[in-house]
Image (cartoon, rainbow, N blue to C red):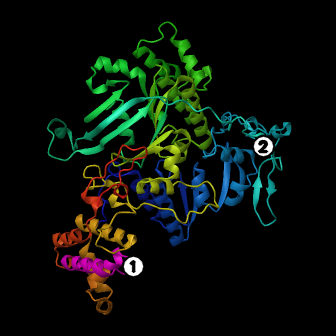
Amino acid sequence: RRPPGSRSYPHRVLRGMRQRVLIAIALACQPRLLVADEPTTALDVTIQAQILDLIDDLQDEFGMSVLMITHDLGVVAETCDRVAVMYAGEIVEEGPVEEIFHNPSHPYTYTLLESIPTEDKDRLTPIEGNVPDLIDMPEGCHFADRCPWAQPECREGEIPFLQHGGEDVDHRSKCILPDFDESEYGVEGVASESDHEVGEPLVELDGMRKYYEQEDGWFDRFFPGEKPSVKAVDGVSLDVHEGETLGLVGESGCGKSTAGRALLHLDPPTDGTVVFAGDDLGDLSKTELRERRKDMQMVFQDPMSSLDPRMTVGQTVMEPLKIHGLAEGRRRERVVELLEEVGLDPSQYDRYPHELSGGQRQRIGIARALAVDPDFIVADEPVSALDVSVQAQIINLMEDLQEEYGLTYLFIAHDLSVVRHISDRVAVMYLGEIVEVAETDELFGDPKHPYTNALLSAIPEPDPLADTADRTILKGDVPSPIDPPSGCHFRTRCPSVIPPEDLDVEQERYREVMFYRQRVESRDIDLEAAREQADAEAAGDRAVADGGSGLHAVLRDQFFDEPLSGKTREAVEESFDHLAEGDWEGAEDVLRETFESVCEREDPHLGDEAHPAACHLFSDAE
């Protein structure tokens, strides 16, 4: 029998599933070496944690080596035994992971680690300048032009490797300096900046929904059928205050980007209201909305795909000026001013996107958004594809522009360390709904919703010595927005789902029961294979000891890690009896009557208190 999902096409499954398929393809030949090239770069923290755990488990099972290529230093710290740091085409430092993170010996490694956002930094410290042109490499150390400790001899001849650490430590660095004064670096970069003022609500969302009709072909576009809608955004109510940065976080597929586009009416909402500066955008005519768009702009996730490859930098930034009839007679001068504002040299005016780095392309996207002097910018994953140093440059730029122009940001991201650094408040989104909102420090210090807890727990720690034993790793993917779970949408994955009051059961066993229920309700248990396994194992003796049939024993082993007891065991065994007779509905009824939770009966509501969480654990639900 084909495994579930094997008939699906790549565009119909989530990113995490696509990544698992690629891993399966790579393992088909049972390799001794697996080259994992940025396997988690585009994934959110929970799916990233699943993929990394999967690679670790497969490595143990097959005894293979893994070459992990990544720019995520948290991933390096948690998964690697040894690290090689590469710059401009050559290895500049190599050693055990603990040595690299706690005793970096090459200036590039040190400055790279200093670029990581941490809670004690008011301002990030990016590496100045850019990677040199690989066609015309400089003499000597390739990092010398950007190195804060560069000496004249750094630019002469071949740079040797120096050994660092103890005699039993293989830690070498391609630098003439045996050490360098770390106190000389980043003094200006980490200087505390003044807090910006936050005013009254500028953007007010009330019950905003965005549904999409399912289309299988051109016929469905003109004659919609009875298929249920895709509920991408399902009743979002939220305020964004003037001058603040509101972070919007959640897993891929939860509706963050759709919410941002619907808010700006780039893809108008299906229902609900969006009020911007007192105007209901849904009541505006096309002409009025176009005029209003000067005040609302967007920075897109992938600058390479959002920039027209046929247009130069100057043409790209000038386009909104032409559309809105601004800066007539001095548009070129205005474009040059904007390029300088975002840290680009005016000499790049006539370059095309493919001639620029990822960070430079993202700066163009920001300059284009600033061209019409907006009050509000939706930044959709603006740094997700950038390395930590370029990421720090872009974040600092956005903060500087906010201070200078009084901008308001909706910052959409899945990198929670970046969100923590830049945001005043954070809203957590799951399957089209907001489940928690709080001030940044409060949400990270005292999260309420189990989903928020899981997101924070999954953040990779850029410290190989950090204790991650108590980490919560969510299982499975976000459910389909076509048919979301009843009650709390998160209940199918929640590690704290509430059992019935009259049921004495451990949380882990209850989670196993709920997972088993889901498989029964979706008819996703191969009973024929289970019967064949029971016969093959000659489970009769064990079944007698367990007090059930061979099929019972196979199903117990498949779904439960520990023995069940009391009312829980009785109900599960009764459901096994129904399955043995092919009575799926009978099994479903028994499980629902015994194990139904308040989390599936009632929708939790997001309150209006200072730190609301849409969870029955924090409500008066029974």
Q: Which residue is mark 2?
A: 183
Tell me how far mark 2 sits from mark 1, CA to CA: 54 Å
Looking at the image, can residue 381 be seen?
yes
Instruction: Please rate how many residues cluster around mark 1, counting C-alpha atoms within 10 Å: few if below 14, some from 14 to 19, many from 20.
Output: few
Q: Amino acid at mark 1?
A: Glu
- 162 versus 151 height, above or below: below
Q: Quadrant of the C terminus?
A: bottom left
Q: Position of residue 273 (x, y in %)?
A: 29, 32
Front residue of 415/121: it is 121
Q: Secondary structure at mark 2?
A: helix
Which sits earlier in the primary sequence, circle 2 or circle 1?
Answer: 2
In magenta stretch: residue 576: yes
Q: Is residue 335 left or right of residue 618?
A: right
Q: Which residue is mark 1?
A: 562
Q: Which residues are magenta?
A: 555-578
> Do the residues under discs 2 and 1 have CB atoms within 8 angstroms?
no
Q: Amino acid at mark 2?
A: Ser
Magenta span dominant secondary structure: helix
Q: Find residue 528 and name its label.
A: none
Query: Which residue corresponds to the image point at 27% horizontal and 59% vertical from the top-left?
Result: 600
- 316 versus 263 height, above or below: above
